[in-house]
Image (cartoon, coloured by chain):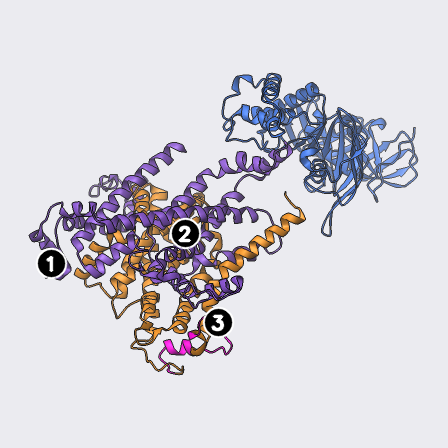
Amino acid sequence: MTEIVLDTLGKDFGSFTALRDMDLTIRDGEFMALLGPSGCGKSTTMNMIAGMLEPTRGQIRFDGKRIDGVPMAKRGVGFVFQNYAIFTHMSVRENLAYGPKAQGMSRAEVTRRVSDIAELLQLTPMLDRRAAGLSVNILQRIAIGRSAAVEPAIFLLDEPLSNVDAAFRAVMRSELKGLQRRFSQTMVYVTHDQLEAMTMADRIAVMDHGRLLQVGTPLEVYNNPSDTFVARFIGSPGMNLIPARVDGDTAHMDGIGALTLTAAPGTAQVLAGFRPEVVHPDDDGPLAMGVEIVEHIGARTIVHLRAGETEVKAVLDAEHTAPREGQAFRFRVDAADIRLFDPATGAAMKRHG
Amino acid sequence: MTEIADIPPPRTETPAPPDREAARLGFRLTLPAQLLVLFIAVFPICMQIYISLTDWSPLDGIPWWRAHELWIGLTNYSDLASDFRFWGALWRTLFVMLVCVPVQFFLGLGLAILFVDEFPGRRIFYSVLLVPMMVVPAVAGYMFFMLFQSGGPVNDILSAFAGRTVSIAWLSDPDLALAAVIIADIWQWTPLMFLILLAGLVSVPKDQQLAAVLLGAGWWRRFRTIILPRMKTIIIIALAIRVIENFKIFDTLYIMTGGGPGIATETISVYIYKVTQQELIWGYVAAIALAILISLSIVSAFAIARLRRGS
Amino acid sequence: MHRSLSFETFRYAAILTFLALSLIPTIWMMSMAFKPVAEWQAAGANLTWWPENPTLDNFRFIFGESGSDLIVALERTAGRPILASLLAATFGTLIAMVAGSAAAYGLSRFGSGGNLPLALIQLRIFPPMAVMIPVMIMWAFLGLIDTWWGLALIYGIVTMPFSFWLMKTFFDDMPREIEDAALVEGCSRWRVFTRITLPIMRPALASSGLFVFILNWSDYLIALLLTTRDWVTIPVYMASLSSSMTGQLYGAKAALGLIAAVPPVIMGIAIQKQLVRGLTFGALKE
């Protein structure tokens, strides 16, 4: 039960800045995802929270107490490694008992904790099995249980699903989310997979190139990305961003058509953004592009549209008949679904009205 | 030998299936090695058994295949049982091994622990520390022969510490000569332990060690519960290699002391060598050699079987 | 993980102690090799750690130039023993590598010779001294005593376990796809082995070869038993550098020892990465 505050936190490796001036408050009991492509600084951030790295600048506070200089064993941090780092030469029981034993708890206490955790995580039937050769979701439970046995203040999870088969990930995600609810512990989850972040996290911190770009609930980040990077990174496929010339409350897109905006921005050149899911096929729609490729993915159909150099992706659900490749495709986008970005800085423009 | 059965019969009309070709090539490729093993193991051992039952010596003027004229049955073996020089040599060999191997192991392990993580100078120190094991053992023997002369540098250093002239006759005192030989062996082969154990230490998964730290385990607990169990096989290999090689100890020792003074540093290899070259009773040597081969085979077969069961 | 000042101090102190202890013997020999006669004959209080008048006299002496202050002349110079060591070690390595790699490939790819791994380990476990009687008899019968080729043959056999095991692990590690592609193209397996696998394995062959060469070059016992005069190797010859007349010719021995010690040390450092694999019969790859 801990609130984590990162205060202008920064880390340099020699002349390379891995993380610059990160301010972030992770609330008590919150499931926070640090999301970004590799090299964005998310793992660096997590390793500093765990104490594996010392910050170059700034502070980390747990419940208001500075923890820089506190050795990692004393921070009360439960860490779940990418490959779980299960002690495969031990039994499941020995794995779970490792922390309590290392902290010098009495034999009775160790036994009690192990049986409690095992019960909670449904590991009781396999307590005496060797940890080697168990399936990944069991390993995940052992990894979490092993950390939970010492009752850490926070849990850090380092891309725990990245080595798991795609088919199995959905199961693991829901199991993990369930575990978090049960422990109601502060959890920081590092991932490069936006789907994991979107489905599990209470809030997402999107990072790129050592910078924190946006913090918000999955819906906020999805609906109102703070800049073009977040817009493209979140969602699959990401947001369409099209150069447009604004005239009054109309945005003109070369070779495609004109969009009506809810309000008139100040500048003339913008990037008009809209999600592939808000593209509505409409034979009378104001926009038209050529259909290049049509992909059917289950109930969804992804249509790749092109006009000159500009590409747009549209996601249609099953009720729409998919256009055929080579055809022209007319569509509309509702004014409320359009986000505008500054083409020079990439930052989102404030919405008026 | 399944390979022989796999040699294809004379050409038939259908082309040979590819696995036939593979088997034939496999057989041909392994043939030279098989023949060399046969040449060095099977034939010599048969010859050795034959000679060991005779009193043959190259000085007798009769070729070895007529050694049966000097047939003495198992006399050589019964002589061996009461050969105090042999048992002394065997005991000394084991003693040297029992001192050297553990010392090398703990020194090597200690050094390896110091080398696990990165620090300035690590690479160069590592390379330099390996030098002793690459020095030709005979040359190493000669180095230590020089060092341990009574007017030599070891005594010189000791004098500097003692503040008076020390002139210990290292190589002509029976106990000290054995100590000198042991020191030379430790000097030369600690790097090997270091090398192997470091490779083993480095191969212990980092994240498991980190996980143990995060769970609150101190250094010793980590070492005992994570590192040692993971290194078990490597430790066994390292010890086995040194035990095997140490049993053969000859080059360094023979150059330093020649097995002397008297027989004070005579090990099995030195003893056999002396009987072979100086006393020339080859029938007896063959019996000793066979006895050793048989006991080693039993010990090693037992050890390998246990290892197999363990892993 | 444990990074404190006291630990770092301890680390460097311990390593430097070890370093000093491992280097002193070698440095002493180097120093002796470059000392003039008067200095290497000195003892006790007159000892000097470094040559005060460094000279190459010792090297000249062992190669037969009587530039030094020694009155004795050598019956035989070091040239021939060095040649003997080179020839025996080189051809021994060749035999071990050819037979060992071929067998390793046969086992690794086609599963032939399944008895070899254990047989070769056994061969390594036995002290050479314990099989030398029959070998000496056989070598005498074949006229191989005191020849470099006789020595090369036994070296090849004795070190074959290493070349076999080393190359086996390398072949096991090599991805099969490359060979399979060539087989599909219609190459014979022999052609695949010689034209594709061996060229790819060149670095592995080189480091294994160097490793085996070091072992062969380091031999003393076998040469002591199988050579007598014409083709004695360096370590055997070294013993002749002392006589009842002159006593130990320390300087000359040190010079020769240096010549013998330098090649394996350089080679060993060059193949440092493969040393562990070689020494542990491939059980451990770094």
Q: Residue at x 41, y 66 (%)?
A: B150
Colour of chain B in the rendered structure image:
purple
The three-letter amino acid code for the residue at tag 1 is Pro
Tell me: B197 left or right of C3. Answer: left
**Disc 3/disc 1 C-alpha distance (Å):** 57 Å
Q: Which residues are magenta?
A: C41-66
Displayed quadrant of residue A205: top right
Quarter of the figure with the N terminus of chain C? top right
Q: Residue C95 placed where, x, y %?
A: 31, 57
In the rendering, at what x and y percent does residue A223 appear?
Answer: 80, 28
Q: Determine which residue is flagged by label 2.
A: C196
Q: Is residue A143 above or below residue C126?
A: above
Q: Position of residue A47 (x, y in %)?
A: 69, 38
Left of A223 or right of it: where is C224? left
Camera-side residue: C182 or A19? A19
Q: Secondary structure at mark 3?
A: helix
| Residue under numbered circle 1 | B63
Which residue carries the number 3 mark? C45
The residue at the far left in this view is B69
Q: Amino acid at mark 3?
A: Ala
Q: Secondary structure at mark 2?
A: helix
Real-space CA distance between mark 2 and mark 1, rounded to the nearest whole angstrom: 50 Å
Tag 1: Cα neighbours inside 10 Å, few (<14), some, or many (≥20)? Answer: few
Please name the color used to draw chain C.
orange
Mark closest to the chain's N terminus, 3 or 2: 3
Who is closer to the viewer here, B238 or A312? B238
Residue drawn 28% across the image and 68% down it: C231
- The chain holding disc 3 is C
